[in-house]
């Protein structure tokens, strides 16, 4: 695992900060370890700070009144989550749980706000992260509201192709059941769509690896 200072320096939130400012960030970051399936915070918990993934994966999700889970995002190394309370001091608006054995860094709200007040470049980085998060949520809302499930899956596979910089295949970084929740559907429906895409010659499913047989048609899906 990267050293704390190295990981923070390469994260979107702290990238480009001078060494002196980065060391102040390192000084307030508290390392926390969680086993797989552990809850980091519940919706409604006091927003006393935010987190950044050092290693592992964290899902942030909402639960409906009938117990249905909707994943909002999956966060990996270098990505912050739970930032909203930093500005408003409001409770966490969703739940956060680890998908694998995970280490995070916790940034207490008051200490971080003090640093941000005196560091304009840190405030600009924070705004950039929040703007990126808004674009992701806008795309997710568009997909859930305007696209049928096959289109959502195709869009997610294209996202993985870009993220993994591959055109011939991608590796699912979460179980298919979690992917179904992320795409707003059931595991059974997702399995049928994977099968249909395979029958149509778009993909070939090899466990967690999805071989992309026809990138052009997938792009138009």
Image: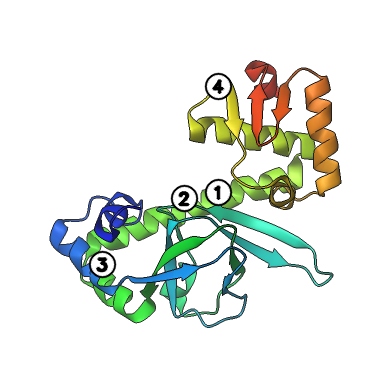
Q: Position of residue 155 (x, y in %)?
A: 65, 35
Nearest the eye: 19 or 188: 188
Question: At 57% from the left edge and 35% from the top edge, which residue is drawn?
Answer: 160
Q: Alpha carbon of mark 4 to alpha carbon of mark 1: how far?
A: 22 Å
Give the numbered dot on residue 25. Answer: 3
Q: Which residue is tagged 2? A: 132
Q: Is residue 113 left or right of residue 209?
A: left
Whether residues under marks 1 and 2 lie with C-beta atoms below 8 angstroms apart, the answer is: yes
Circles 2 and 4, Cβ within 8 Å, touching? The answer is no
Q: Residues within 10 Å of mark 4 (few under 14, many from 20)?
A: some
Question: Comparing marks 3 and 2, which lies closer to the viewer?
Answer: 3
Q: CA distance from mark 4 to mark 3?
A: 38 Å
Tag in front: 3 or 1: 3
Q: Are marks 4 and 1 in contact (CB under 8 Å)?
A: no
- Compare marks 2 and 4 and give the one earlier in the sequence: 2
Residue for badge 1:
136
105 and 48: which is toward the camera: 105
Of circles 2 and 4, which is in front? 4
Q: CA distance from mark 3 to mark 2?
A: 21 Å
Kindly identify the residue that appears in the image at 61 percent across and 45 percent down: 139
Mark 4 or mark 1: whose residue is earlier in sequence: 1
Alpha carbon separation for disc pair 3 and 1: 26 Å
* Residue identified by numbered label 4: 167
Other residues around mark 3 within 10 Å, as few (<14) / some (14–19) / many (≥20): many
């Amino acid at each position: 695992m990267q050293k704390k200072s190295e990981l923070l320096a390469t994260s979107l939130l702290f990238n480009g900060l001078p060494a002196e400012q980065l060391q102040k960030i390192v000084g307030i970051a508290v390392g926390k370890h969680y086993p797989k399936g552990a809850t980091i915070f519940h919706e409604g918990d006091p927003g006393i700070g935010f987190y950044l993934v050092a290693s592992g994966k964290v899902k942030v999700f909402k639960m409906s009144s009938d117990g249905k889970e909707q994943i909002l995002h999956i966060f990996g190394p270098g990505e912050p989550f739970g930032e909203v309370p930093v500005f408003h001091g409001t409770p966490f608006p969703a739940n956060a749980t680890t998908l694998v054995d995970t280490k995070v860094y916790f940034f207490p709200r008051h200490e971080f706000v003090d640093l941000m007040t005196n560091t304009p470049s840190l405030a600009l980085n924070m705004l950039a992260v929040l703007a990126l998060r808004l674009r992701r949520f806008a795309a997710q809302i568009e997909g859930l509201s305007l696209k049928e499930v096959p289109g959502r899956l195709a869009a997610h596979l294209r996202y993985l192709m870009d993220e993994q910089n591959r055109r011939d295949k991608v590796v699912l970084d979460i179980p298919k059941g979690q992917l179904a929740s992320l795409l707003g559907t059931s595991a059974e429906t997702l399995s049928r769509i994977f099968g249909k895409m395979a029958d149509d010659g778009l993909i070939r499913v090899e466990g967690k690896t999805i071989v992309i047989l026809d990138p052009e048609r997938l792009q138009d899906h």
